[in-house]
Image (cartoon, helix red, strand yellow):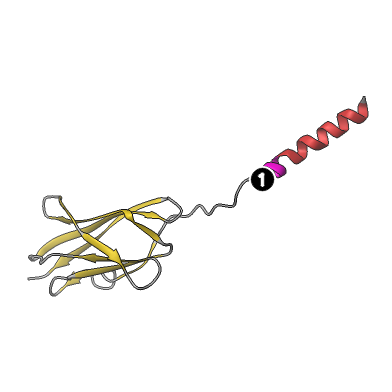
Amino acid sequence: MPFLSLRLKGALRLMPLLVCLMMPSVSFSHAVVTESSLAKEAIKAHHPTKVVLLFNANVELALSRVFLVSAGDIFHPAEISRGQRAGELLIHLPSLEPGDYAIKYKVFAADGHLTENNIRFHVAP
């Protein structure tokens, strides 16, 4: 009987390793902005017509939403498209009056993780 007990203990010790080996490999990371056309110039002399955001992962365009936020926290949906580089998102903006604005984004990485944040900027008169 002691032999069976040792075998059972050994098998139980290996169980976590076996479970890990049987699970599929998945990357658990969020899409993070690594480059922004607004990051270099938070104050614009004239309004930007396009904002470029580069993420460290591919973004699911159909599941992502971007808004232009104007004074009074008014949200305006922004048109988005893919850029030329992997993970690049182009945000097309309407004509902007002088004032404070933010780009609010909620994007899904290709692995399904949600990332949301905002980038504030000012349009000078």
Which residue is situated farthest in the bottom direction here?
A: 45
In the depicted view, which residue is nearer to us: 45 or 109?
Answer: 109
Q: How many marks?
A: 1
Which residue is situated farthest in the front direction here?
A: 62
Tell me the residue that label 1 is attached to.
22
Which residue is situated farthest in the top direction here?
A: 1
Q: Residues within 10 Å of mark 1 (few under 14, many from 20)?
A: few
Residue 5 drawn at (x, y percent): 87, 28
In the depicted view, which residue is nearer to us: 38 or 75?
Answer: 75
Picture layout, residue 12 above or below residue 59: above
The residue at the point 21 percent across, 61 percent down is 79
Quadrant assignment for the N terminus: top right
Quadrant assignment for the C terminus: bottom left
The residue at the point 59 percent across, 52 percent down is 25
Residue 114 drawn at (x, y percent): 38, 50
Picture layout, residue 38 above or below residue 20: below
Q: Is residue 11 left or right of residue 43?
A: right
Q: Is residue 61 left or right of residue 42?
A: right
Q: Main secondary structure of the magenta part?
A: helix
In the depicted view, which residue is nearer to us: 71 or 84?
Answer: 84
Asked which quadrant contains residue 85, the reply is: bottom left
Residue 45 drawn at (x, y percent): 13, 75
Asked which quadrant contains residue 20, the reply is: top right
Element at badge 1?
helix
The residue at the point 39 percent across, 65 percent down is 87
Q: Is residue 5 magenta?
A: no
The segment highlighted magenta reads 16-21
In the depicted view, which residue is nearer to us: 10 or 122?
Answer: 10
Q: As shown in the figure, which amino acid type bears the numbered disc 1?
A: Met
The residue at the point 28 percent across, 71 percent down is 37
Q: Is residue 50 left or right of residue 116?
A: left
Residue 39 drawn at (x, y percent): 29, 69
